Image: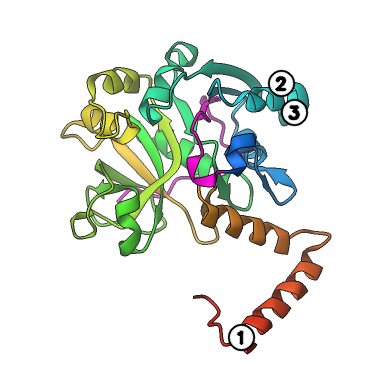
Amino acid sequence: MIAPTETSEAVSSSITRAVVPVAGQGSRLRPLTHLLPKELLPVGRKLVLDYVMEELHAAGIREALFVISPRKPQIRTYLEEIVGASTGLHFAFAVQEEPKGSGDALLYAAEWVGAQPFVVAFGDCILDSSPVGAPLKRLIQAFEQHRVEAAVLVEEVERERLSRYGVVAPVETVSQATPFLIRDIIEKPAVDAAPSSFVVAARWILKPTIFEAIRRSSPDPRGEWNIPDALHHLLGSQPRAVAVPLLEGEARRDIGSWGSFLMETVRSAMNDPEYGAQIRRVAAKELTRFSDSGIVVGK
């Protein structure tokens, strides 16, 4: 177990660059994504990508490279012509012609990254925290404090869900709130073979050594190159990566399927500062109607 890292606002970091992969097809959200990339879908009064950019800026990131698809020009238009400099981030772009996995997307950033460590933040995932950016700040601090090859944000999930994610393999007994060393990441293991209940939560800190590790790794059965597979090659037998858990009150909000998109839409609507109370009253009436109709709420 590793001692907790400091979370003071005064802590400064040399990590100011982030790579944001946004070239995925969003096939599970069709037909919406035939017209609009999932990263530009509205969740409450903001778009998914707005939340990601706010998080990055709050954590001290000042430059972001967006790995985009030629089939999703709206993202570049939105960032360059609509958002502009209002986010506090300087934007750059790289075009991934075909979506071939998270590892392949990173290779397009190799020249831009240079020799410094960098954040990877997936553009279809919102991190819900107060204050904004707190999990990413802890991740950066843990990476710098413990001088590892990589740091990964993780969340604890129910065992029956583990086969959907990359699951980290801790070196020793884990505390739910404390960063811990890991020896490997197992991609979508069988539930009974999962090495822990902590899964990758869409944020990484990586060194440029990851690029050669990606090139040495093999594609998965779908023909995609993935960050966990590359990290497996990079770490070898040494526990040179640290996992940082999400804390109570923090959550990863994926916007990749109808279920997650609709749930986050409802959550945001019910918390709207102007209309939230009205929407909660409507929701309460709907729940009563379901109950009166014999429908079990929550099923």
Q: Rounded to the nearest whole Å, what is the CA distance between mark 2 and mark 3?
A: 6 Å
Q: Residues within 10 Å of mark 3 (few under 14, many from 20)?
A: few
Using the image as rendered, state which of residue 92 and residue 209 is in the foreground. 92
Q: Is residue 132 left or right of residue 160?
A: right
Q: Residue at x 47, y 36 (%)?
A: 140
The secondary element bearing badge 1 is classed as helix
Q: Evaluate whether residue 36 shows in this view.
A: no
Query: Picture coordinates of residue 19 (x, y %)?
Result: 50, 26
| Residue 181 occupies quadrant | top left
Magenta span includes 17: yes
Q: Rounded to the nearest whole Å, what is the CA distance between mark 3 and mark 1?
A: 44 Å
Q: Is residue 259 left or right of residue 177?
A: right
Query: Picture coordinates of residue 208 (x, y %)?
Result: 38, 19
Residue linked to disc 3: 83
Using the image as rendered, state which of residue 97 and residue 134 is in the foreground. 97
The segment highlighted magenta reads 1-30
Residue linked to disc 1: 291
Q: Are marks 2 and 1 in contact (CB under 8 Å)?
A: no
The secondary element bearing badge 3 is classed as helix
Q: Amino acid at mark 2?
A: Glu
Q: Nearer the viewer, mark 3 or mark 1?
A: 1
The secondary element bearing badge 2 is classed as helix
Residue 148 is marked as none
Q: Amino acid at mark 3?
A: Val
Using the image as rendered, state which of residue 43 and residue 227 is in the foreground. 43
Query: Picture coordinates of residue 130 (x, y %)?
Result: 63, 53
Relative vertical location of residue 65 with respect to residue 256 in this rendering, above or below: above
Residue linked to disc 2: 80
Q: Evaluate whether residue 56 shows in this view.
A: yes
Q: Residue at x 15, y 34 (%)?
A: 237
Q: Residue at x 34, y 19 (%)?
A: 211
